[in-house]
Image: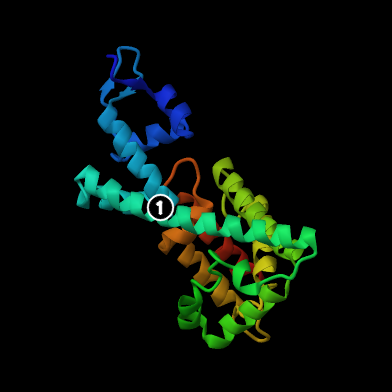
């Protein structure tokens, strides 16, 4: 190793990832080490670090590893690609800054007994960004019902719902990484919770009386694999779509047996 290279352990620690993930990236040709030491350790040069930074940035956008490989191959020039991503990050930074200011203003008003100004409370929030997509997939009534349900909940209820979704994602990943089969008792227990969670969301086919719950659950599992935005919620340490595929297969098994 020369002075301009870092070991796989060093890079894993600095980048907040794992050696296992970096070895997987090497195995699939996404991130090749700059050199291999006599001890078999992988070492990475500055150019490899730039490539890893781009990989992690694209993962933050929810892209799967195959899509990331395509982007890196298509956008071979590093500086323009990073400049484009930097522009997006700055937009997100501005949106988050406005959200922080909105919440701070609300807290200040509540503490001081001041009148709340609705026009100042939601700067930086965009709860309707998937409106067109939902309406296209499931109709305008589906979006209207879901939107009305979300607006009707208290802050605590929204936090509890989000925690439930987060717990499901965590438990799906743990099941997928444990090596159990999608139709195992462990995986099917998580699938049951997932379907119960879905049927509690107004506007979805799973919640509609007489709706095709089975078809909806199976179709949703397929979407988790096809759409990297959703598949990212179930990404395991191995990367790729393996986690989403596990969820899809477990949901299909549950739907076939119970719905």
**Front residue of this view, candidates 158 and 182:** 158
**Front residue of this view, candidates 93 and 159:** 93
The answer to whether residue 7 is left or right of residue 232 is left
Q: Is residue 90 above or below residue 122?
A: above
At horizontal 46% and vertical 50% (from top left) the residue drawn is 242
The answer to whether residue 228 is left or right of residue 54 is right
Location of residue 84 in the rendering, given as x and y in whole percent from the top left corner: 29, 53
Quadrant, the C terminus: bottom right
At horizontal 44% and vertical 23% (from top left) the residue drawn is 9
Location of residue 58 in the rendering, given as x and y in whole percent from the top left corner: 37, 49
The scheme the figure's colours follow is: rainbow
Which residue reaches farthest top?
A: 38
At horizontal 26% and vertical 26% (from top left) the residue drawn is 34
Element type at mark 1: helix
Location of residue 20 in the rendering, given as x and y in whole percent from the top left corner: 45, 32
Q: Is residue 8 above or below residue 168?
A: above
Residue that carries the numbered disc 1 in the rendered image: 90
Q: Quadrant of residue 193?
A: bottom right
Quadrant, the N terminus: top left
Q: Is residue 52 visible?
A: yes
Q: Is residue 66 visible?
A: no
The answer to whether residue 88 is left or right of residue 18 is left
Location of residue 241 in the rendering, given as x and y in whole percent from the top left corner: 43, 52
At horizontal 66% and vertical 56% (from top left) the residue drawn is 104
């Amino acid at each position: 190793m020369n002075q301009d290279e870092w070991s796989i352990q060093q890079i894993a620690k600095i980048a907040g990832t794992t050696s296992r993930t970096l070895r997987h990236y090497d195995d699939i040709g996404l991130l090749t080490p700059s050199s291999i030491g006599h001890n078999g350790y992988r070492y990475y040069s500055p150019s490899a670090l730039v490539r890893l930074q781009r990989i992690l940035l694209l993962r933050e956008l929810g892209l799967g590893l195959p899509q990331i490989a395509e982007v890196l191959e298509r956008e071979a020039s590093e500086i323009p690609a990073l400049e484009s991503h930097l522009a997006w990050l700055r937009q997100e930074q501005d949106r988050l800054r406005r959200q922080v200011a909105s919440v701070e203003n609300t807290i200040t008003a509540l503490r001081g007994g001041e009148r709340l100004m609705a026009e100042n409370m939601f700067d930086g929030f965009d709860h309707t960004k998937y409106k067109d997509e939902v309406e296209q997939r499931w109709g305008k009534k589906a979006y209207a019902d879901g939107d009305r349900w979300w607006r009707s909940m208290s802050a605590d209820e929204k936090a509890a719902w989000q925690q439930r979704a987060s717990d499901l994602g965590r438990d799906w990943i743990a099941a997928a990484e444990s090596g159990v089969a999608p139709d195992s008792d462990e995986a099917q227990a998580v699938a049951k919770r997932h379907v119960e969670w879905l049927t509690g969301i107004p506007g979805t086919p799973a919640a509609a009386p007489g709706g095709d719950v089975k078809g909806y659950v199976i179709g949703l599992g397929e979407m988790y694999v096809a759409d990297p935005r959703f598949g990212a919620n179930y990404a395991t340490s191995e990367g790729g779509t393996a986690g989403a595929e596990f969820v899809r297969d477990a949901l299909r098994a549950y739907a076939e047996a119970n719905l």
